Amino acid sequence: MAFYTIAIVGLFLAGFFLLVVFGAKSYSASAVMQNDHMEMRALSAYIATSIKGSDSTGAVQIEQGPEGPVLVIADGDTGYAKRIYQSAGNLVEDYARADSALRPDQAMVIAPTAAFNVEQPAANRLVVTTDEGRTLITLRSEGGEGE
């Protein structure tokens, strides 16, 4: 009789242990997925926040750089601008005079990306495409049509 009691307790403990192991693996997998999803959205969120933070009439421009489009976000009336562009497989940002040459060697790396494209299908709309997908951004300033 004592053997059966010990066997039942052992079986219960083994089941409990398996439940804990499978639960921990499930939690770990969901935490990794959540972290990957947050990292994937970080690049798009950074670009959208940069644009919306300086959204005023004529402040957001798209220019052509040596490796593709350059997103130019003017800093008010200072003559300086934040410029976001792709260089050597990375999305980089520099802050300099708006009319100066790009300096990727001095730019801050935002994130690695093999693709970066910016389109303006309408006066108040931007479409930014990176490795992580497309981000649609609506400008409050209506892209130069008046505040």
Image (cartoon, rainbow, N blue to C red):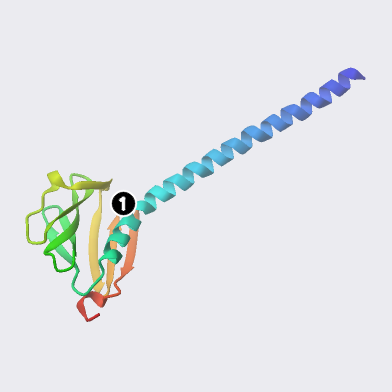
Residue located beneath label 1 in the image: 131
- Residue shown at the point (21%, 47%) measured from the top left: 108
How many numbered discs, if any? 1
- Three-letter code, disc 1: Asp
- Residue shown at the point (14%, 52%) measured from the top left: 67
Badge 1 crowding class, 10 Å Cα cut-off, few under 14, some 14 to 19, many 20 or more, is some
Left or right side of 20 for 57: left
Estimate the x, y position of residue 76 in percent, counting from the top left. Answer: 18, 68
- Residue 58 in which image quadrant: bottom left
Left or right side of 43 for 123: left
The answer to whether 41 is drawn above or below residue 121 in the figure is above
Left or right side of 132 for 72: left
The answer to whether 89 is drawn above or below residue 6 in the figure is below
**Residue 123 visible in rendering:** no
Q: Find the residue positioned furthest to the right.
A: 1
**Residue 12 visible in rendering:** yes
The answer to whether 118 is drawn above or below residue 1 in the figure is below
Assign the N terminus to one quadrant of the image.
top right
Estimate the x, y position of residue 101 in percent, counting from the top left. Answer: 7, 55
Estimate the x, y position of residue 72 in percent, counting from the top left. Answer: 18, 62
Assign the C terminus to one quadrant of the image.
bottom left
Q: Find the residue positioned furthest to the bottom.
A: 146
Label 1: which secondary element: loop
- Residue shown at the point (21%, 75%) measured from the top left: 57
